[in-house]
Amino acid sequence: MFDAPYCTTMNRPSTSPCESLAERYQGLLEVAQAIAAQRDLDTLCRDLAQHLPRVVQVNFVALSLHDPVRNTMRLHTIQANVPADLVGGHEGPVDESPAGVVWQTQQALLVPNVAQERRWPKVIGCMMEDGANSFCFVPLTTAGRRLGAMGFLSLEKEAYSETDLEFLQLVAKQVAVAVENALAFQQIAELKDKLAKEKLYLEDEIRLDYNFEEIIGESPVLKRVLKEVEIVAPTDSTVLILGETGTGKELIARAIHNLSGRQERTFVKLNCAAIPSGLLESELFGHERGAFTGAIAQKIGRFELADGGTLFLDEVGDVPLELQSKLLRVLQEQEFERLGSTRTTKVNVRLVAATNRDLLSMVAEKQFRSDLFYRLNVFPVTLPPLRDRREDIPLLVRYFAQKLARRMDKRVETIPAGVMAALSAYHWPGNIRELENLIERAVILSRGTDLHVPLAELTVAGPTDARSVTSLEDAERDHIRRALDAAKWVIGGPAGAAARLGMKRTTLQSKMQKLGISRLS
């Protein structure tokens, strides 16, 4: 068997050409009919192996297709029972094979005596080892595309003549049309498979319960972040989102995607800390069947799923050091190889990364590559912790209370002012995620229209502001006063104090009377 990546044995005895020209062209017609309906490249090659010896003297056949991405000539096997090391095809540089020269020049090539040929020494040496003494290559070309070259090799010297070349080019034209059709259907099948995987991924995403659907808040620090998002979103620049756990980094990443020109394509996410380090490479880049133990099928990675869209890598600081160089390459070159494959896959992906770790310190400690850090840190966006945007807490509390009450089929109409004051004073180490979880428990515990918040949990979870240790009545009075001051003592209406406090106007008036609150007091 040839070691060169251009040939495969037909495993048939050398046959003589058809006795008459009519019989030969009849055989060619049968070949064309047999391969015309094939849509699978492997099946097409098997049919060629069965029918070609009827119309041409051949011991070996080379079917080499040009790979435009790598600019190489790639062998596609003719038979299914070739050695395992040739399954899937080998490839080599265009200039180092007769097939490559024929593809470049679009001229047929005839070598009557292999032993006298000095070009392509590696390929010629392999041919001689297998006993081939003459060969010819003809272009594999359709009306709109140069596919590669098709070679016919014989154990006999001077097996092919110039007259044979004309007939073999007719054979190659028929084969080229069939190959082009098979490649087109293969591409369609791959796209359908990718779309099916994207559909499954998006269905899984839709079933997830996100922390919140909207960005809630009116604080200056949040508005500053949203302004940065508005500026960077239309570009394709890499964004690094920094912030503590639970500050809403994924929500900001989605906002960047939705405001970009990629909004119609897929938003794919991956939490790097949630995947075992041994499987992270496969999750990012995919793998071929048999690439490692347990790889029973081909898998498309997140980069390939996000082609044309946005990939969000959460907790990027947890990417193992040995994988960071591959991540850097795909960011710089927009290309990668699946595990177990030598084929380069080109992608067009916009990366948004996030972390709650200090990457600069990790760089100093040699735990994170400096070149990867600078590649990620093109446009950093820092999210403020909830304790730095306390004015947004009442808005978030009301939003979560209404959302969760609807989900649980409950009615929560009032949030006591003292409760709101205590929630606003708490320092929230778990940020928005902790707040949402607490409100969920509060809605579960609430039996009436008032939100019953287990405030005792706040003192257990962490220290609070000095205001939270005052009496509940004093805290409630202070909070109502602040709301009234902010509303210029307007009680009703959409901008009134009652709306700000999340209660009815009549309920607020009753509270004011009970607590002795008046504009003159």
Image: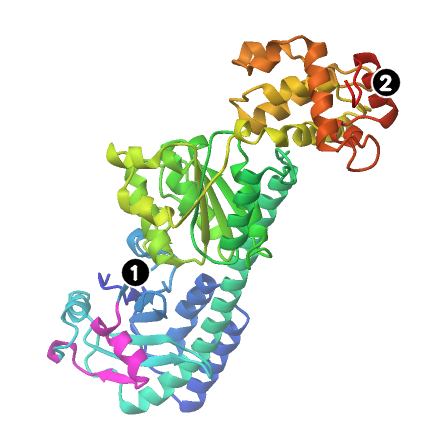
Q: Which residues are magenta?
A: 93-116
Q: Where's the C terminus, which quadrant? A: top right
Q: Residue furthest right?
A: 506
Given residues 10 and 221, the one toward you in this image is 221
Residue 348 screen position, x and y as percent: 45, 58
Label 2, on which residue? Answer: 510
- Residue 26 vertical position relative to residue 484 in the rendered view, above or below: below
- Residue 224 vertical position relative to residue 349 in the rendered view, above or below: above
- Residue 35 vertical position relative to residue 313 in the rendered view, above or below: below
Q: Can residue 298 be seen from the camera position used here?
A: no
Q: Within the magenta stretch, is there residue 497?
A: no
Identify the element where label 2 is drawn.
helix
Identify which amino acid the numbered label 1 is placed on. His
Residue at image location 54% in from the left, 13% down from the top? 461
Q: Is residue 142 left or right of residue 65?
A: right
Q: Is residue 263 left or right of residue 512?
A: left
